[in-house]
Amino acid sequence: MTNAAVSTYKPSFSPLQLHSRSLAWQIGAVILGSLFLALSSYIEVPMVPVPVTMQTFAVTLVGALYGWRFGALTIAAWLVEGAAGFPVLAGGAAGIQHFVGPTGGYLFAFPVVGAVVGWLAERGWNGKRVMLAFAAMLIGNLLCLVLGTAWLAVMIGTEKAITFGFLPFIVGGLLKSALGAATLKLFSTDRAEQGDHSSGTR
């Protein structure tokens, strides 16, 4: 047998490198990430039955930057805060009732979305390949809409769910995907510049 029989997986792209940080650093990152998610919830355009927010932008970005494990964990921590009564959901909302109402499907979809985008980012769908980063963000936004609309369809019917819970968010999903990809590109550029500086002569 060779020594290559067992290998440890390391993400190909992880700007924050959370997998190699101390526990205190990781906990701090989860707290800061949940605060970022909460702030994104306050950027809201009221609509019925589901408001437009920057939550999906924040969810996909956290997934891509944190990686799928820490991304999903951070998003789940934010949702637990909201369920516990902290005003961190859309427009400062809070309470368990939002998880069983029209927005419940979207909320439950968020950790899944973060994990999927993080998994893709770790495999090259990131700022180093901006079109793939855009595709990863778009997949995340689409997945959120599909799962959220499916939940909504149980409550108000399929036709109304698509009309009010899917179609109005398509353009926003495209724009937020582009913004997310551009943000990842900036992180990738910063890391490349840091690498150039660290490898320079003294």
Image (cartoon, grey):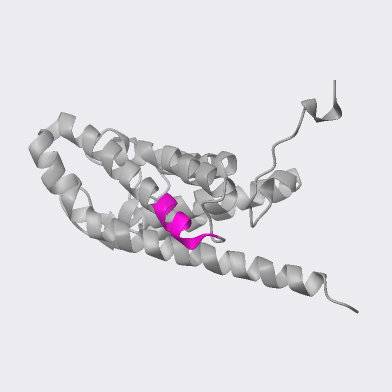
- The residue that appears at 64% across and 70% down in the rendered structure is 190
Q: Residue 148: give x, y in percent of width and height.
A: 27, 39
Q: Is residue 146 above or below residue 135?
A: above
Q: Residue 86: give x, y in percent of width and height.
A: 43, 47
- Kindly give the residue lying farthest to the top in the view shown: 1
- The residue that appears at 50% across and 55% down in the rendered structure is 35
Magenta residues span: 129-137
Rendered image quadrant of residue 37? bottom left
Q: Is residue 149 above or below residue 169?
A: above
Q: Nearer the viewer, residue 110 or 34?
A: 110
Rendered image quadrant of residue 123? top right
State left or right for residue 22 relative to residue 127. right
State left or right for residue 78 relative to residue 140. right
- The residue that appears at 11% across and 46% down in the rendered structure is 163
- Kindly give the residue lying farthest to the front in the view shown: 1
State left or right for residue 188 relative to residue 200. left
Residue 19: in sight, yes or no? Answer: yes
Q: Residue 48: give x, y in percent of width and height.
A: 15, 50
Residue 81: in sight, yes or no? Answer: no
